[in-house]
């Protein structure tokens, strides 16, 4: 229907990343034409691999943001699913990629990963994936924990300073 076509066009125009829009030249095209172009662009397994990994590694720049571990866990799961579809999921399990993913962990999380990974089985990749899934689950549980009145980062620093003074 025409409504469906309009909704699809609006969604495509708002949801597609700027660089993809520029490559597609979406002006005066139907939704079907845009979908055909997207299929053609992303049928290239090497392109899917490269762009998936770039998106995943782009998260590294947000390493210290709130909810980073959850975002990383979800991005890794999405990337793995996408690469599995085109037969490139082995790429994520390569030791070089696993090391790069480990480097994306903030220092405190890396230390926690080292501590916990002793209890995990499987490859280094599966250990990292298990850790990220556990941490994501814990972050989600923490958000639901208590009244929801979490201290602001500045209040946490004040609490830590008070704890140090009390320890002396």
Image (cartoon, rainbow, N blue to C red):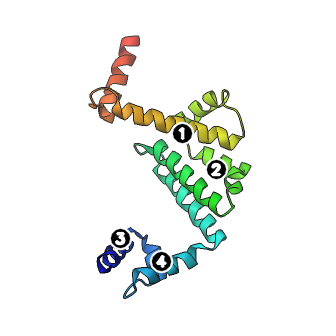
Whichever of callouts 1 and 4 sits on the residue coming sooner in the sequence is 4
Tell me the residue that label 4 is attached to.
35
Look at the numbered disc 1 and give the secondary structure of its residue. Answer: helix
Q: Nearer the viewer, mark 1 or mark 4?
A: 4
Look at the numbered disc 4 and give the secondary structure of its residue. Answer: helix
Q: Is residue 87 visible?
A: yes
Name above or below for residue 118 compared with residue 29: above
Q: In terms of depth relative to the viewer, which is nearer, 47 or 105?
A: 47
Distance between the Cα atoms at labels 3 and 1? 30 Å
Whichever of callouts 2 and 4 sits on the residue coming sooner in the sequence is 4
Mark 1 Cα-neighbour bin, 10 Å: few <14, some 14–19, many ≥20:
some
Query: Percent x, y for residue 157?
Result: 35, 29
Q: Is residue 107 visible?
A: no
The circle on residue 11 is 3
Name above or below for residue 12 compared with residue 139: below
Whichever of callouts 3 and 1 sits on the residue coming sooner in the sequence is 3
Query: Percent x, y for residue 50?
Result: 62, 66
Tell me the residue that label 2 is attached to.
100
Query: Percent x, y for residue 147?
Result: 26, 28
Q: In terms of depth relative to the viewer, which is nearer, 27 or 151?
A: 27
Tell me the residue that label 1 is attached to.
133
Whichever of callouts 4 and 3 sits on the residue coming sooner in the sequence is 3
Name above or below for residue 101 compared with residue 39: above
Distance between the Cα atoms at labels 3 and 2? 34 Å
Rendered residue at 30%/31% (across/down): 150
Distance between the Cα atoms at labels 1 and 2? 18 Å
Look at the numbered disc 2 and give the secondary structure of its residue. Answer: helix
Q: Nearer the viewer, mark 3 or mark 2?
A: 3
Quarter of the rendering containing residue 110:
top right
Rendered residue at 47%/43% (across/down): 70
Whichever of callouts 1 and 2 sits on the residue coming sooner in the sequence is 2
Q: In terms of depth relative to the viewer, which is nearer, 157 or 58?
A: 58
């Amino acid at each position: 229907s025409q409504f469906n076509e309009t909704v699809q066009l609006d969604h495509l125009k708002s949801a597609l990343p700027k660089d993809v829009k520029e490559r597609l030249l979406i002006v005066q095209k139907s939704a079907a034409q845009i979908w055909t172009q997207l299929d053609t662009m992303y049928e290239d397994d090497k392109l899917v691999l490269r762009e998936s990994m770039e998106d995943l590694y782009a998260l590294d720049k947000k390493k210290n943001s709130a909810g980073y571990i959850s975002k990383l866990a979800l991005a890794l799961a999405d990337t793995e699913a996408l690469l599995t579809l085109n037969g490139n999921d082995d790429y994520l399990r390569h030791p070089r990629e696993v090391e790069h993913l480990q480097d994306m962990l903030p220092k405190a999380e890396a230390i926690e990963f080292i501590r916990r990974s002793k209890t995990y089985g499987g490859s280094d990749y599966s250990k990292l994936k298990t850790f990220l899934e556990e941490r994501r689950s814990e972050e989600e549980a923490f958000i639901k924990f208590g009244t929801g009145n979490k201290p602001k980062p500045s209040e946490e620093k004040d609490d830590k300073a008070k704890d140090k003074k009390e320890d002396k």
